[in-house]
Image: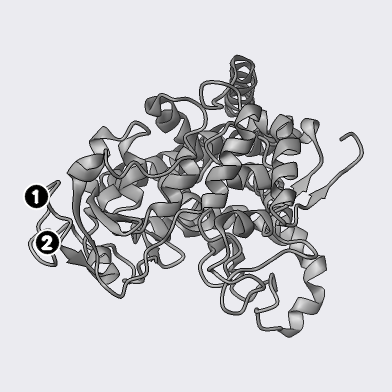
């Protein structure tokens, strides 16, 4: 259950509330309501137990910032899908400070999902399914290409073709590099994931906003009519049956594509307001992660200086401004087009009281029937495997290079479980 406390996450305060953090291993009898935990970003819930996230984060093998994101939240399903195993309750007992109070319904790990993980384990390469050696050649080409094109235009002047090409390179960085990094899928070493995850800031976004939107909200609440930020078009589009119909929606098939290109301006500028308020779509980022607040603002300012102010300083003209806009719009259109079709298609499920699936549906069903696959290995190579949204949503910490080879085993297992698996093949599959 996510916090709804307003714009700013609370400052860490362990002086009040049920239980005192620090009495590890003997807190099983201390009862916390979910509201208690929401007010305590140093705590997190897994199953029916409450843990000291602030103490544990430095020992988390995947990096402290993943734990930080779930301060004050329920991390049961997040742990399950990122580790593909049951919660090691005995091992984590020394960090336990209490349990959920009577009357609070705990989130239960999906046993069907854990069985699925075992069934498809043979399709995941040994070592955890991180990036293969060949991937780093692609990553080097994409990063090198983006830097080279941007530097060339700074030295020799803007052209429309190179500006559009730079937008494509930015999209490829988003799809092929930062996305895997910020899901912890590039490497077992969290430092590699962290630093390459910051390429989200290089292309104009922000790593912390992305983590809040994707890891905390979208992946755990996919197509939830109230909780998934990717389902909120704020009246501009009608994305789901529960959205109110407005007159201009009769024309949305005409303005959808231009709107996807314009989304880049929200990403670059309006999202700065979300960053200042340390939230995404009104959902506060945990205060346990506030150590990244000032660095995130600094990186946003550096992007504006490098990508907007410097070109205009060197060549102050409307043409320069137009080329900057062309890069922004090309990258945004590429990204938005492919993400949009992933969870918005005929027959897709929605989750929630007004959706086609209840929130009590299994984790596997909620991920599989709200997602779709498109195309095959070629598109996966270009787009960081994100045309395999079903595999990605089930196994976000597996590198995208493996999704194409995993898909047949996943489909067989999922359909055996009785769930609808949607794959749209295209020419060149």
Badge 2 is on which residue?
19
Q: Are marks 1 and 2 in contact (CB under 8 Å)?
A: yes
Secondary structure type for disc 1: loop
Compared with 385, 138 (above or below) is above
Compared with 288, 38 (above or below) is below
The label shown at residue 75 is none
Residue located at (51% from left, 67% from top): 227
Query: Would residue 186 be found to the left or right of residue 88 on screen?
Result: right
Image quadrant where one finds the C terminus = top right
Give neighbour class at mark 2: few <14, some 14-19, many 20+ (Cα, 10 Å). some
Badge 1 is on which residue?
23
Q: Quadrant of residue 388?
A: top right
In this view, the residue in front, 70 or 30, is 30
Q: Quadrant of residue 316?
A: top right
Let me know if residue 429 appears in the view: yes
Task: Give percent across and percent down for residue 364.
Answer: 60, 53
Give neighbour class at mark 1: few <14, some 14-19, many 20+ (Cα, 10 Å). some
Secondary structure type for disc 2: loop
Residue located at (59% from left, 15% from top): 133
Query: Would residue 287 be found to the left or right of residue 378 on screen?
Result: left
Residue located at (62% from left, 20% from top): 135
Task: Give percent across and percent down for residue 5.
Answer: 31, 71
Alpha carbons under labels 1 and 2: distance apart? 9 Å
Task: Give percent across and percent down for residue 3.
Answer: 35, 67
Residue located at (44% from left, 30% from top): 193
In this view, the residue in front, 203 or 133, is 133
Q: How is the image coloured?
A: one colour
In this view, the residue in front, 82 or 272, is 82
């Amino acid at each position: 259950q996510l916090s709804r406390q307003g714009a700013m996450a609370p400052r860490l305060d362990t002086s009040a509330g049920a239980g005192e953090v620090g009495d590890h291993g003997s807190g099983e009898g201390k009862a916390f309501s979910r509201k208690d935990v929401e007010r305590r970003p140093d705590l997190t819930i897994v199953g029916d137990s409450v843990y000291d996230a602030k103490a544990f984060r430095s020992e988390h093998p995947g990096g402290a910032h993943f734990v930080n994101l779930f301060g004050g939240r329920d991390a049961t399903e997040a742990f399950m899908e990122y580790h593909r195993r049951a919660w090691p309750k005995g091992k984590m007992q020394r960090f336990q400070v209490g349990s959920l109070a009577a009357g609070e319904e705990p989130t239960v790990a999906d046993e069907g999902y854990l069985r699925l993980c075992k069934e498809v384990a043979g399709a995941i390469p040994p070592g955890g399914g991180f990036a293969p050696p060949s991937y780093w050649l692609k990553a080097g080409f994409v990063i090198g290409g983006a830097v080279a094109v941007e530097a060339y235009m700074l030295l020799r002047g803007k052209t429309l073709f190179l500006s559009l090409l730079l937008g494509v390179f930015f999209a490829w960085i988003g799809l092929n590099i930062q996305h895997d990094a910020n899901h912890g899928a590039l490497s077992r070493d969290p430092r590699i994931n962290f630093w390459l995850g910051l390429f989200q800031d290089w292309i104009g976004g922000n790593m912390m906003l992305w983590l809040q939107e994707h890891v905390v909200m979208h992946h755990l609440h996919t197509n939830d009519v109230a909780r998934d930020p990717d389902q909120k078009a704020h009246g501009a589009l009608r994305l789901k049956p529960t959205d109110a119909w407005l007159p201009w929606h009769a024309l949305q098939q005409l303005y959808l594509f231009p709107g996807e290109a314009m989304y880049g301006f929200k990403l670059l500028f309006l999202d700065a307001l979300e960053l200042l308020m340390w939230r995404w779509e009104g959902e506060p980022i945990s205060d346990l992660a506030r150590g990244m607040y000032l660095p995130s603002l600094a990186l946003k300012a550096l992007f504006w200086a490098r990508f907007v102010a410097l070109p205009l300083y060197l060549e102050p003209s409307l043409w320069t401004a137009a080329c900057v806009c062309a890069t922004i719009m090309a990258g945004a259109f590429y990204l938005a087009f492919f993400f949009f079709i992933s969870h918005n298609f005929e027959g897709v499920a929605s989750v929630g009281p007004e959706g086609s699936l209840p929130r009590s549906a299994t984790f596997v069903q909620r991920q599989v029937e709200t997602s779709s696959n498109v195309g095959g290995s070629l598109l996966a190579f270009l787009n960081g495997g994100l045309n395999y949204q079903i595999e990605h949503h089930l196994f976000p910490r597996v590198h995208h290079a493996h999704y194409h080879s995993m898909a047949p085993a996943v489909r067989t297992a999922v359909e055996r479980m009785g769930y609808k698996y949607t794959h749209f093949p295209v020419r060149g599959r």
